[in-house]
Amino acid sequence: MSEDKKPEQQTSEATEEKYMRTVKSFVLRAGRMTEGQQKAMETVWPEMGLTLDRGMLNLAEVFGREAPVVLEIGFGMGDSLIEMAKHQPEKNYIGIEVHRPGVGRLLSNIEKEGLTNIRVFCDDAIEVLAQCIPDESLSTLQLFFPDPWHKKKHHKRRIVQLSLAETLRKKLKVGGQFHMATDWENYAEHMMEIMSAAPGYRNVAGDQAYSPQPEWRPVTKFQKRGERLGHGVWDLMFERTAD
């Protein structure tokens, strides 16, 4: 009969288990904020910023109205999110980004454009989804040009995994869509494989087919850079089904 594990062994295993549950899909870079970005964090954030400690949100109260809610994971510097919110004022937008300069730039542009239909988290999207976004509350989830983690040994860090697909499905309304875009063909194939296997989704374009870029999705900085490098661009749109 084996001996009981020593306390230090139990601590080590618990630490390892915690690490395995929290493999990050991003690297937190320490970028410098401009004076304008910092000012926006101080003046605009109190009105437009959201934090984990608010707990599960009532989205109609957050925006002061009932409207379809679009949530974007990892909006970068936020330029495309601003364009979508400006040209689709009938929708409410929630942006999530971990890099403060990007959040500051988005907030600054929100103020410049006089937009009222965007709210912002500066937190890990996985934590935001778990703690703050009610089930069956979103009309669209967007993930545009996430880090491709192109080395095979880093594929486990790719954010699109079966576990994420199941989490997002719970947050989408029936008929709501998970819209992805990437300029890495291997990642596009990975996304297609994961989402085609995920239960409770239907590929809007048809089995194993990629969607054309919708006219309302702006061309992002990452897309322009990829196209300059000769990369293609792949959009995938999967709809939540009732079962």
Image (cartoon, rainbow, N blue to C red):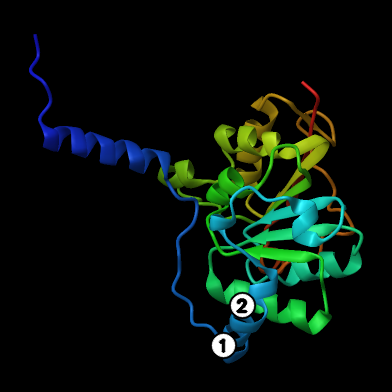
- Which dot marks residue 104? 2
Q: Residue at x 62, y 52 (%)?
A: 184
Indicate the quadrant where residue 190 lies: top right
The image shows residue 49 at horizontal and vertical percentages of 64, 68
Q: Nearer the viewer, residue 190 or 237?
A: 237
- In this rendering, does residue 168 appear at all? yes
Q: Is residue 3 above or below residue 180?
A: above
Q: Residue at x 27, y 36 (%)?
A: 14
Q: Residue furthest bottom?
A: 35
The image shows residue 119 at horizontal and vertical percentages of 71, 64
The kind of secondary structure element at disc 1 is loop
The amino acid on which the numbered mark 2 sits, given as a three-letter code, is Gly
Residue identified by numbered label 1 = 34
Dot 1, how many residues are within 10 Å of its Cα: few (below 14), some (14-19), or many (20+)?
A: few
Q: Residue at x 80, y 24 (%)?
A: 242
The image shows residue 191 at horizontal and vertical percentages of 64, 39
**Residues at marks 1 and 2, CA–CA distance in whole angstroms:** 8 Å
The quadrant in which the N terminus is found is top left
